[in-house]
Amino acid sequence: MRKHGSLIVFAKEPRVGNVKTRLARDIGYVNATFWYRQQLATLIKELTDKSPFKKKYLFISPNNSKRSFMYYTPKGWEVRYQSNGELGKRMKDALNNTGEGPRILIGSDIPGINNKHIKSALKELTKTKTVFGPARDGGYWLIGMARYQKAPGMQNVRWSSEHALVDTIKCFGQRTTIGYITTMNDIDNGQDFERYYSRPSAR
């Protein structure tokens, strides 16, 4: 299989009080941190095996947290720190500084992501300039840019709200083409957690 393009995973240092704070208020801070660590480890393993990408990056925060990610970064992953600023700027900087080929950026806290989803996004980028993986809450779990395409400044986006995807699309203007892949479940609070894990397929 010919490998090309770059995969970017955004992750926070997996320590208590630093990750999934809204979820933690419902299920407890230790439980939420344990859940996040499990998600991160599962995701990295899935995307390491049979990956279609030439380059794989784990963009982490905060600065000086590399030691916390040693367990999660097998051979073949390059660890970089996220840039400063709000989320949109950090995403733009990562997308625009990881090569000229197709680039896919995802978070590390969406359960169920697998290589089929990522390959679907790459396929979509052969037809469009930008691809999104929508989340059911109005946000998105994946953003991708086609070869040679640059991400715009993602300003005035209402992050962590039902407007996040729509606001981000507006930042691209009229000169891009946009495709979509599978809608996934984001888990931000206890209700999301209970709903996801009460599915028949999760039992």
Image: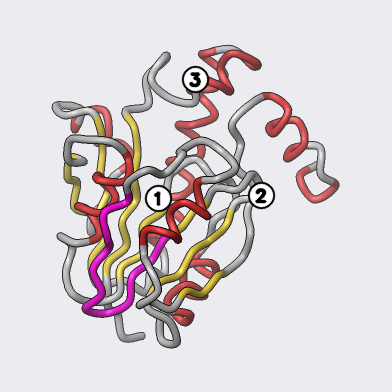
| Mark 2 and mark 1: Cα distance apart in space | 23 Å
Callout 2: 10 Å neighbours few (<14), some, many (20+)? some
**149 w.r.t. 91: above or below:** below
Type of amino acid under label 1: Ile
Contact between labelled residues 3 and 1, with CB atoms less than 8 Å apart: no
Image coordinates for residue 186, horizontal then vertical, percent: 60, 42
Left or right: where does residue 136 sit relative to residue 172? right
Tell me the distance, in whole angstroms, between the alpha carbons under discs 3 and 2.
20 Å
Residue identified by numbered label 3: 21
**Residue behind mark 2:** 136
- Element assignment for label 2: loop
In front: mark 3 or mark 2?
2
Residue at disc 1, secondary structure? helix
CA gap, disc 1 to disc 3?
22 Å
Instruction: Tell me if residue 186 comes above or below residue 36 in the rendering.
Output: below
Mark positioned earlier in the residue sequence (3 or 2): 3
> Which of pointers 2 and 1 lies earlier in the amino acid sequence?
1
Q: Position of residue 203 (x, y in %)?
A: 80, 42
The front one of 148 and 175 is 175
Query: Which residue is identified by label 1?
Result: 44
